[in-house]
Amino acid sequence: GEASNDAAQKINAARAEEDKKVAEAQANFLKIREDYRHQITQDLVSTDKDIADLEAKSKTATGKTKAQIDAALPGIHTMRENVSSEYKALEFSSAVSWDSAKANVDKAYDDLKKAVSKAD
């Protein structure tokens, strides 16, 4: 009986330790996810300003410059919507799907930044 009780205590202690590690890992993941989402939000504010600047430039530009900006803007707006969709998916990503979800946001955002830079 004593050996059985001792074994049960060790098992319970091991389970408690494992539960603690799982909880810490989950908390760390949530912090990483929130920090990343905050960074992307800040980046998007800056990029949205760049897009607004492009739209304003289009109104005053002429000739080839205006044509280039006007041709790029619909694609830029589509890319911006794609970033928003991928960003929203982050909220539902788990630790298992995090790397993939983050990679999707990074790629969508990089594509958007390149398009905005190229149009300017």
Image (cartoon, rainbow, N blue to C red):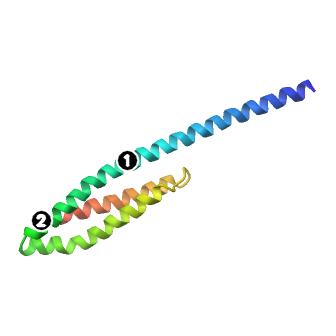
Where is residue 54? Give x, y as percent.
17, 64
On residue 57, which mark appears?
2
Where is residue 13? Give x, y as percent.
74, 30
Of residues 102 and 27, the one nearer the viewer is 27
Amino acid type assigned to the residue bearing label 1 in the image: His
Question: Eyeballing the image, is 64 above or below 35?
Answer: below
The C terminus: image quadrant: bottom left
Earlier residue among tags 1 and 2? 1
- Give me the residue at 67% from left, 36% from top: 18
Residue ID for mark 1: 38
Amino acid type assigned to the residue bearing label 2 in the image: Lys
Mark 1 residue crowding within 10 angstroms, few (<14) / some (14–19) / many (20+): few
Kindly tell me whether residue 46 is visible in this rendering: yes
- Give me the residue at 16% from left, 61% from top: 53
Question: Eyeballing the image, is 33 above or below 86?
Answer: above
Mark 2 residue crowding within 10 angstroms, few (<14) / some (14–19) / many (20+): some
Secondary structure under tag 2 reads helix
- Label 1, label 2: how far apart the Cα atoms are: 29 Å
On residue 65, which mark appears?
none
The N terminus: image quadrant: top right
Is 76 placed left or right of 88 in the picture?
left
- Give me the residue at 47% from left, 42% from top: 31
Kindly tell me whether residue 120 is visible in this rendering: no
State which quadrant residue 70 falls in.
Answer: bottom left
Where is residue 66? Give x, y as percent.
11, 72
